[in-house]
Amino acid sequence: MEAMTAEGRVLLAAPRGYCAGVDRAVVTVEKALDRYGPPVYVRKQIVHNLHVVQTLEKRGAIFVEELEEVPEGALVVFSAHGVSPMVHAEAAERGLRTIDATCPLVTKVHNEARRFAKEDLDIVLIGHEGHEEVEGTSGEAPEHIQLVQSPDDVADVAVRDPSRVVWLSQTTLSVDETYETVNRLRERFPDLMSPPSDDICYATQNRQVAIKEVAAQSELVLVVGSANSSNSVRLVEVALEAGATAAYRVDNASEIDEAWLEGVTTVGLTSGASVPEELVSGVVHWLAERGFPTVDEHRTTEESLIFSLPRELRKDLKGQTDG
Ligand code: SF4
């Protein structure tokens, strides 16, 4: 392999990693385990990160795909990606105790979907089919919502009244691609209405802005994140569009191929919104041992948002303190 000693540097994007919604969801499961003891059931992965899920499993969380796997009367946490009203109804029917860890920024999109459906608008939801967040949002107004996955899908959109169409989106999409889709929609429906504020969340946007600047200065970009993490996968795409010669997503350092480093002097590094910083540190360490000892952080903005824990959990935690 080509010698890179002392030449190589790592350009670390910031912001990266945990967002406020992921932090809240993970802490929710941790506190539920502390407060009620194991097992605590969690519908779907609490956040899309393998390491986080495995760590919580060791502490007594049991991850299930559907509520039918949860015993009657047990406690179940709904993941950060949100659930459709049908899931809430099923939980109530089965007498399950629930804690809803849906990110408030996903709840915002659910509320918009309900409101626009009430106004009887046709809603075009930009997102990825099968993603849990899309299933949850669509479930708020199935008769009014149709899914569009890419700009090319716009030609197939059929609406009742072209002057009464609004768009919404999944929170973790590529900003640029989403606006391309919106522009195509507007070409077809000039009166297209927009959500009152961005559905693509602050964390997704901030991580994309940061990696764009980092990628423009890097031959190789590594994105730490799991394969089912939408915002992590988008970061790879954004890095390539921004000029990185190569970009790969890895769950952790063990998945990096040394051959990727050949001829590289700057490695751009970031992580998705569901990724604990220790996994990034593992990659930094791995790179340091292979001729990339210098780490420069490139920060594009500060983040300070914090969400309070779900109300149902806060109430019990307060009771515990008071008691
Ligand atoms: S990525 Fe955005 S929407 Fe998803 S949990 Fe984080 S803050 Fe919430």
Image (cartoon, rainbow, N blue to C red):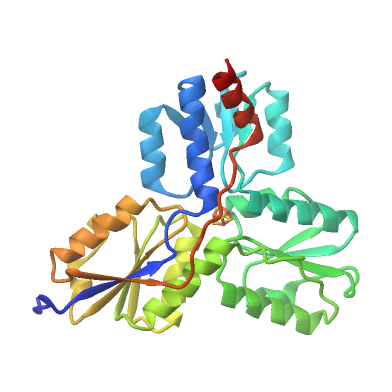
Q: Residue at x 56, y 42 (%)?
A: 79
* Quarter that holds the C terminus: top right
Is residue 216 or residue 162 the one in the foreground?
216
Residue at 59% x, 50% y: name it: 132
Relative to residue 183, is residue 22 drawn left or right? left
Please tell me in which quadrant of the rendered image residue 297 appears: bottom left
| Left or right: 115, with 201 as reference point | right
Residue at 70% across / 31% down in the picture?
Answer: 90
Q: Residue 54: where, in percent of width, then height?
A: 37, 39
Query: Where does the image place residue 301, in percent across and percent down from the top left?
Result: 49, 69
Task: Establish if 63 lies above or below 305.
Answer: above
Q: From the viewer's perspective, is residue 215 above or below residue 251?
A: below
Q: Quadrant of residue 211?
A: bottom left
Quadrant position of the N terminus in the picture = bottom left
Q: Residue furthest front?
A: 322
Residue 86 horizontal/vertical position (percent)? 73, 38
Asked if residue 71 can be seen in this view, the reply is: no
State ligand 1's quadrant.
bottom right
Residue reaching furthest to the top: 323
Image x and y of residue 282, in percent: 25, 55
